[in-house]
Amino acid sequence: MTLTVGLLSFAHPHVYGYAAALADQGVRVIGTDTGTPDPGTVRGADLAAQLGITYAEDVASVLAEAPDAVVICSENSRHRELTEQALAAGVHVLCEKPLATSDEDAAAMVAAAERAGRILMTAYPVRFAPAFADLVARARAGQLGQILAVHGTNNGKMPRPSERSWFTDPARSGGGALMDHVVHLADLLDELLGEPAENVHAVTNQILHADAGVETGGVVSVAYPSGVIAQIDCSWSVPDSAPTWGGLTLEVHGTRGSMRIDPFAEHVHGYDASGAVWQPYGTDLDARMIATFLDAVRSGTRPQPDGGVGARTLAIVTAAQRSVASGRPETTL
């Protein structure tokens, strides 16, 4: 049976990778754009044509096609609205991270999925990196002993205001580098440690992009009930001239050993007539995530990371935001 999948909004640049992954899976894709595009950007029907998908005028038109599932790539502030619309129509949902911009919205989305008996999956592609799976397997086999501390980095380019201005608008994004980058590492920690965070202490700055309107760099310390301390370095510190968007690393230190992974390290780089070249050749993490989601839609199983993971990882970010405001550690809700 050929699945039909709706793409709700083209606001997030991940829409390119997700559309390609859906096409490779042989599903029928119907997309619609939402929100206000920035002047000069390719969105709406024009972008749908570039992506090779059928375009619909609005969300209601997509849902009227009775899709099996939808993938939400809107501004963060619209995740709850679009998720609830899809779930009310009996449609499974893969929602771009972060799950929402508030803990209340995230909880409402999880509850809506439970009531509807439908999948709510949070889009965390790094979860599907082979290096991370190997790390988790080794840690669970006891090779690292008792985990004591974790250090993660997620540093990238600031989304260009001329193309995706909503990233630097706190009303639509919910925050800057904290919201954009901390959640990926929070997801890896959620899977690795198997326990929710207890309290969070964070500091941020806008040194690199003073006019951004949101934080562009920060350090977040997360304490877990077992005693593990995790530190997350998040920033939009990679210059526009860099040949790649950035990267993510994770170091885990235990009583018997340490491991470090760099899921985006597989690449060749150098220079040609056009300048710097960066060509990745590793696993397509978007494709693995999309395949997992579609397999769950077909089989009726519950894929991970689900909405509960999305809510727990968002709670780390919202606690970090409260910590920045108060100047002291804050508990997660």
Image: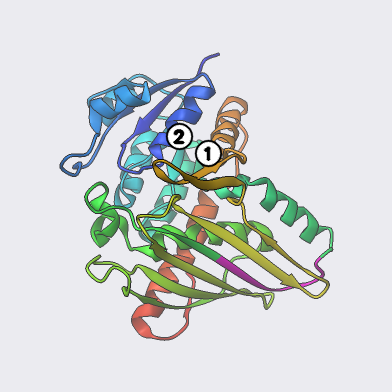
Residue 257 sits in quarter: bottom right
Q: Which residue bears the numbered disc 2?
A: 18
- Expressed as whole percent of the image width and height from the top left, the position of residue 299 reads 62, 27
Q: Which residue bears the numbered disc 1?
A: 286
Relative height, residue 109 to residue 156 (above, below)? above
Q: Secondary structure at mark 1?
A: helix
Relative height, residue 100 to residue 68 (above, below)? below
Q: Is residue 128 magenta?
A: no
Relative height, residue 294 to residue 312 (above, below)? above
Residue at position x 39%, y 70% in the image? 217
Instruction: Name the magenta segment's main secondary structure.
Output: strand
Q: Which residues are magenta?
A: 144-152
Q: Secondary structure at mark 2?
A: helix
Residue sitting nearer the eye, 219 or 85: 219
Residue at position x 24%, y 25% in the image? 45
- Expressed as whole percent of the image width and height from the top left, the position of residue 129 reads 63, 46
What is the spatial separation of the Cα atoms under label 2 and label 1, in whole angstroms? 6 Å
Q: Can residue 96 be seen by looking at this rendering?
A: yes
Amino acid at dot 2? Tyr
Q: Is label 2 in contact with label 1 (beta carbons under 8 Å)?
A: yes
Residue at position x 80%, y 75% in the image? 255
Relative height, residue 110 to residue 70 (above, below)? below
